[in-house]
Image: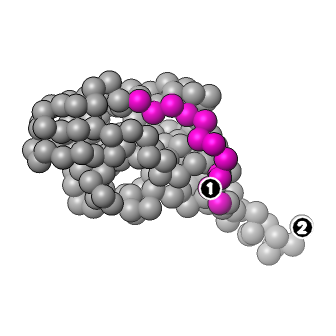
Amino acid sequence: MSKLMILTVLSVAASAWGYSAGAPEAVCGNMTPNHPVSAQKTRFPYKVSVSSDTIKAGEETKINISGKQFKGFLVEVRDGDQAVGSFQIPADDKYLKAINCNGIKGSGATHKNKVEKSDISLTWKAPSTAGKYTVYATVALDGLTFWVAKPSGTINVV
């Protein structure tokens, strides 16, 4: 095998495996993984649900992702294109972590490893400003199959 071919294979593999420890803050804007393929255009096969879709400012609600097993995800609750609120994830959680999107502490939630998951629950704390916010989810079945920034419900903060 030529050196060029080996380098090409290794660079594609690095791209596919590069974010097994979670989405980097750099992808918060478009919520698109830097995987070596394009996002799926097929029906989003996951259910993203909110336990309470109307809460008071500063209160918490649960956001769940369920469906067939997946390896990675990024969730943001947005006001337009800006992530708001904060995910309440303990630093010692084995599977999940909060990231800072757009300079807002904990405003995104992602995976911590590539362990397959089929049902996760995230605690989101509403911002102090009332408004109607949209939950967006990117879910990666694996490094080559993923759906990007799917609007998945709204949370009315009063």
Asked which secondary structure carries label 2, the reply is loop
- Residue under the image location 13 percent in, 37 percent down: 158
Neighbour tally class for label 1: few under 14, some 14-19, many 20 plus, Cα within 10 Å: some
The scheme the figure's colours follow is one colour
- The three-letter code of the residue at mark 1 reads Ala
Residue 14, visible in the rendered structure: no
Q: Which x, y percent locates residue 16?
A: 63, 55
**Vertical relation: 119 (above or below) 8:** above
Mark 2 or mark 1: which comes first in sequence? 2
Query: Residue reaching furthest bottom?
Result: 4
Query: Residue reaching furthest right?
Result: 1
Compare residues 3 and 9 and report the one nearer the observer. 9
Q: Which x, y percent locates residue 155?
A: 28, 38
Q: Is residue 67 magenta?
A: no
- The three-letter code of the residue at mark 2 reads Met
Left or right: 96 in relation to 158: right
Q: Which x, y percent locates residue 15?
A: 62, 60
Q: Which residues are magenta?
A: 38-49
Which label is found at residue 1?
Answer: 2
Which residue was labeled with disc 1? 39
Compare residues 48 and 90 and report the one nearer the observer. 48
